[in-house]
Image (spheres, rainbow, N blue to C red):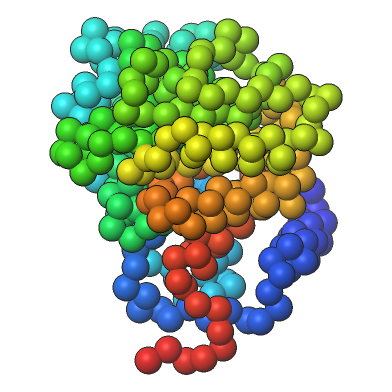
Amino acid sequence: MSQLAHLCNQSIIRLVYSLLMNNSKKPDICASSPIFNLVFSPAYNTNLPAFGLNKPFALDRGELVLKALHEEFGTPMAVAAPQPLSMEDVLLVHSLAYVQTLEDEQTWLEIFELKAEELHRQTATKALTELIEDFLLKSGGTLLAARLALENGLAANLGAGYHHAFPDRGRGYCVINDVAITIRKLQQEKLIKTAMIVDLDFHQGDGTAKTFAGDASVFTLSVHSQEGWPEEKQQSSLDVGILESEKETYLPRMKAAVEAALSQFTPDLVIFIAGSDVYEKDTLPGTKFLRLPLAVLKERDEFVIDTFKKREIPLAMVFAGGYGPHVWEVHHLAVRHLLISSGIKFSAQICS
Ligand SMILES: [Zn+2]
């Protein structure tokens, strides 16, 4: 794409945003906002070729969201830096036998659905198995976001959401299940008794559903593409599988499902898996069954944030699936709404 075309596209994106955001005032955040809501590290933008990987993971999503917010608010966002999880934490959910297999490259090839010859060894400077550090850090971000949510009401980890990882195996690009580990860790520390997972990724949250199957302390809700991977779905506490032919019903069915979940269960914490792979600009071929416009996803994410805020249930959001150069737009609007809902003011006043 030419530079001019690229600039034009950027302008169009900004115009669409300004139309969507219903707020024409130039916002100004009191830079010293005492609330930390966002968890991020520059290391989230993993150098995948260094590990021999060439996948369209949009690992720059957090960076792009922060950049857009910086431009709009006129000041850099305050972010909390995560600490990596320990292996002890990982073992709260995953079996030792599985964790031991992560020392083998073959395990990683299977999780990333690659044949050995598809690994780009010419660009690799690190072993694939070293990627575990990356997953531990980003998963630590989910734990930190959940802690911040318990303190402040609303928080987001600008990455992670590895909902396909089962206790005894990784799959679907998910090595360890940060969401499940976070819940188990907070339960162990007695900071929460119960939790709900609201999973609105394109793909069913099969790993988390399996992890918490039969556990009355955790309610799992998954609204996903019925035709999409995984073909063999697990049983969540509540599943809503949406067919391509039913995509017009996405919003009302999603809203009804969240209300239904809350009529059955009042959690101490909710983890919101806000996957952007249902976005019409997602580039993963397998997500073709649901192509939803930005306005629908804005309404989706705002509904979830507002619903839990109204009920004073702490909410931690994670990014989960999202592929290609445009999916960050979905997260930008969600994070922006989360910040405003947390009390960050939009005004032209100078903050004292
Ligand atoms: Zn997904």
Question: On the picture, is 187 further left or further right than 348?
Answer: left
Identity of the residue drawn at 59% across and 73% down:
72
Q: Residue furthest front?
A: 263
- Foreground: 334 or 52? 334
Identity of the residue drawn at 21% across and 30% down:
89
Identity of the residue drawn at 36% across and 29% down:
218
Q: Is residue 47 above or below residue 328?
A: above
Q: Is residue 226 above or below residue 296?
A: above
Q: Is residue 190 above or below residue 343?
A: above
Residue 135 screen position, x and y as percent: 35, 32
Q: Is residue 344 visible?
A: yes
Question: On the picture, is 131 further left or further right than 23?
Answer: left
Q: Quadrant of residue 242?
A: top right
Residue 110 screen position, x and y as percent: 46, 11
Question: On the picture, is 321 further left or further right than 18?
Answer: left
- Foreground: 336 or 252? 252
